Image: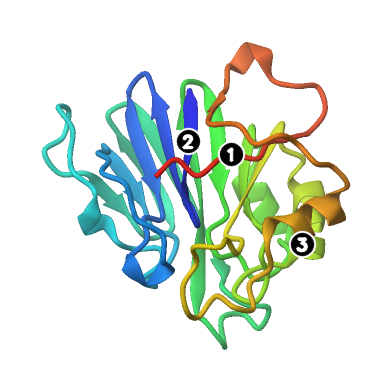
Amino acid sequence: MEITYLGHSAFKLKGKNGTVITDPFGDSVGLAFPNVSADIITVSHQHGDHNAADKIKGTARRAEPFVVSYPGEYEVGGISVFGVQTFHDAEKGAQRGVNTVFTVLMDELKICHLGDLGHELSSSQLDEIGVVDVLLCPVGGHFTIDPKQAVTVIQQIEPSYIIPMHYKTEKHGEGFEEVQPLENFLKEYGVQPTPQPKLVVEKLRLPEETELVVLEINA
């Protein structure tokens, strides 16, 4: 499987049976969303910086992408998607509503996208999520868990790979002033990896210990 970062909370997961795009963002983010196609789109919550499914075209397999935006179990063309309800804040959704954590099973790998998770995970949520090979984790705070909380959630899940997302960049527009940059999370985590254009993941070649990977924005 090949994972590329489209910016903000959007990733492209390309496997043998198709392509999944996570949390496509609208123009308000400040970044330009690339011209991409997908078989499946996951939407963690209905905010404009995460639900711009109309920006994505279909593929030779599917004329229109299958959009998953609620908790539950889904299977599309040999790709399985599992959604677990969480919250967008630390007050059980009182501030920003609900958030869905999606785990995508493809190429015998489990990729977990935390969306705009706003709290540490409960034992029941961890049980529902299960074993994770690649964790796509928000780290910028304000709208999501902050760098310190992100480290705690990573320790809760114990993935093989972590890829940080939802942090402030120079291109982020108005409204994201209080979101922290990636550097704050890297200092908290204690590593400074060299950014990569993509991550190729193979089931039989997973690292024995959790490895942090920073991906360049491929827009």
**Which residue position is annotated with label 2?**
4
* Quarter that holds the C terminus: top left
Residue at the extreme left: 63
Q: Residue at x 11, y 38 (%)?
A: 63
Placement of 85 over or under 36, stated as above or below: below
Q: Is residue 185 left or right of residue 51?
A: right
Separation (CA) of disc 2 from disc 1 = 7 Å
Task: Please rate how many residues cluster around mark 2, counting C-alpha atoms within 10 Å: few if below 14, some from 14 to 19, many from 20.
Answer: many
Separation (CA) of disc 2 from disc 3 = 22 Å
* In front: label 1 or label 3: 1
Separation (CA) of disc 1 from disc 3 = 17 Å
**Which residue position is annotated with label 3?**
147
Front in this rendered view, residue 71 or 20: 20
What kind of element bears circle 1?
loop
Question: Which numbered tag is attached to residue 215?
Answer: 1
Q: Is residue 69 left or right of residue 142?
A: left
Q: Is residue 51 left or right of residue 212?
A: left
**Kind of residue indicated by mark 3:** Pro
Placement of 153 over or under 28, stated as above or below: above
Front in this rendered view, residue 180 or 129: 180
Q: Earlier in the sequence, mark 1 or mark 3?
A: 3
**Labels 1 and 3 touching (C-beta < 8 A):** no
Whole-percent x, y for residue 141 in the image: 68, 70
**Kind of residue indicated by mark 1:** Leu
Whole-percent x, y for residue 20 in the image: 36, 38
**Labels 2 and 3 touching (C-beta < 8 A):** no
